[in-house]
Image (spheres, rainbow, N blue to C red):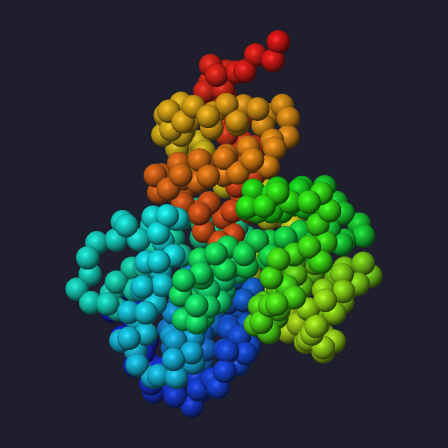
């Protein structure tokens, strides 16, 4: 079975049927634990839930991720609907992504008609992981994006319960996770240059993502969603924050204190934190040679440098198209010019975000900024467009005199 070839879904469903006992997870928490063991929750899938499958087939990290995402969505349908019906589940997942796509990324609009529902879902999942976008599948930028794929699973679960408001829910979860990562990183006692740059990046991302004008002080108490979060949402936020603070393979007193405060605020027992730390340590130790991120003494530095390099390359490779779109946009060009000399207001940031994402929808290789995790990179895009496309901005320079 090749998850990059046509008809891999029916073959995988056949494998699951043969391994009923091994994959017979009784609830969503068991699924979460199983996904964490594969690395899916950490954004680095190195295994699948049926062990026979992963030992038989040599898959890439992207293929493992795709299989785990499909498995998680199928399980969610079965658990929520209490039905073991693959075809209705596949149709339901397709409808979910169709609804998610409205007014958002537009990636489904590029898909041609497929002869079967399973083939259509295969194309949707391939587009979701952006397999044709080589920039996304390299290094830690991809790890961040893949770690946020669990938001899809949470949003699908929510959609099966409350179909009218799940898109808003998905955005709220993403804002909460990104802001929590910012708080976790900010808890470090000794912050190096790249810690500070990444803190600034997370903070800027939270400002661009938030629809409401953010307050000057962001704390655990100001985060949306936390108090009313489900046990799955709480565990996910805690795990993402744990990997954020343990990026340098150590933890100082302030970082541990933050995680403890977060655990208490989430109303989770202390053993949830100790388990989260132990499971991460085990995964990192087991896969140190497989996951590049864990080999580096300072993955934060690696993440920031690779993210910056990725965004620069994307801008330069799409230079002519971006210049044309910017010159036609008018207001966006003016706002980006202003951003080089002063801090934009919340209303101006909202306009920049909306108009820039509209441009990204029209340029295939820029759809990275529309995916979970990609929004974290938006401030880098805003920062480097004026630097790398100076001619557009010289011609439209605002005279302050």
Residue 263 % position (x, y): 71, 69
Residue at image point 38% right, 57% down: 100
Picture quadrant where residue 281 is located: bottom right
Residue at image point 52% right, 27% down: 336
Residue 130 % position (x, y): 38, 53
Seen from the viewer's position, the closer of residues 5 and 336 is 336
The answer to whether residue 182 is above or below residue 34 is: above
The answer to whether residue 221 is above or below residue 18 is: above
Farthest residue, direction left: 115
Residue 53 % position (x, y): 39, 78
Picture quadrant where residue 77 is located: bottom left
Q: In the image, 265: left or right of 384?
A: right
Residue at image point 60% right, 68% down: 229
Q: Report whether residue 358 is seen.
A: yes
Residue 326 % position (x, y): 42, 27
Q: Report whether residue 128 is seen.
A: no
Farthest residue, direction top: 401
The answer to whether residue 372 is above or below residue 31 is: above
Farthest residue, direction bottom: 21
The answer to whether residue 78 is above or below residue 399 is: below
Residue at image point 55% right, 59% down: 173
Q: In the image, 91: left or right of 216?
A: left
Quadrant housing the C terminus: top right
**How many tags in the picture?**
0
Quadrant housing the N terminus: bottom left
């Amino acid at each position: 079975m090749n998850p990059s070839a046509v008809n891999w879904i029916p073959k995988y469903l056949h494998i699951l049927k043969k391994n009923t006992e091994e994959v017979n997870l009784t609830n969503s928490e068991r699924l979460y634990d199983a996904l964490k063991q594969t690395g899916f929750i950490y954004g680095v899938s190195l295994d699948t839930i049926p062990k026979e499958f992963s030992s038989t087939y040599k898959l890439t990290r992207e293929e493992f991720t795709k299989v785990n995402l499909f498995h998680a969505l199928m399980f969610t349908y079965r658990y929520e609907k209490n039905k073991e019906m693959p075809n209705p589940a596949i149709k339901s997942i397709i409808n979910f992504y169709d609804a998610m796509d409205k007014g958002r990324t537009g990636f489904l609009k590029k898909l041609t008609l497929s002869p079967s529902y399973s083939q259509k879902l295969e194309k949707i999942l391939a587009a979701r992981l952006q397999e044709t976008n080589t920039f996304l599948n390299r290094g830690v930028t991809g790890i961040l994006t893949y770690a946020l794929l669990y938001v899809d699973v949470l949003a699908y679960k929510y959609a099966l319960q409350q179909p009218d408001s799940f898109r808003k829910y998905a955005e709220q979860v993403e804002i909460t996770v990104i802001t929590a990562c910012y708080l976790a990183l900010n808890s470090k006692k000794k912050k190096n240059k790249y810690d500070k740059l990444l803190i600034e990046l997370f903070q800027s991302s939270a400002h661009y993502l938030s629809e409401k004008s953010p307050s000057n002080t962001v704390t655990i108490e100001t985060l949306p969603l936390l108090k009313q979060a489900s046990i799955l949402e709480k565990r996910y936020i805690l795990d993402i924050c744990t990997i954020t603070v343990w990026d340098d393979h150590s933890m100082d007193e302030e970082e541990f204190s933050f995680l403890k405060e977060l655990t208490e605020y989430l109303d989770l027992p202390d053993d949830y934190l100790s388990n989260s730390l132990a499971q991460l340590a085990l995964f990192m130790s087991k896969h140190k040679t497989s996951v590049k991120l864990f080999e580096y003494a300072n993955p934060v530095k690696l993440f920031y440098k690779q993210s910056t390099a990725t965004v620069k390359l994307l801008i330069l490779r799409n230079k002519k198209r971006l210049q044309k779109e910017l010159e036609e946009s008018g207001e966006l060009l003016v706002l980006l010019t202003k951003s080089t000399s002063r801090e934009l207001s919340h209303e101006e940031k909202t306009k920049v975000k909306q108009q820039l994402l509209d441009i990204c929808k029209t340029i295939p290789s820029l759809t990275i900024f529309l995916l979970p995790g990609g929004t974290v990179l938006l401030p880098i895009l805003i920062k480097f467009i004026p630097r790398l496309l100076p001619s557009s901005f010289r011609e439209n320079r605002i005279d302050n005199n």
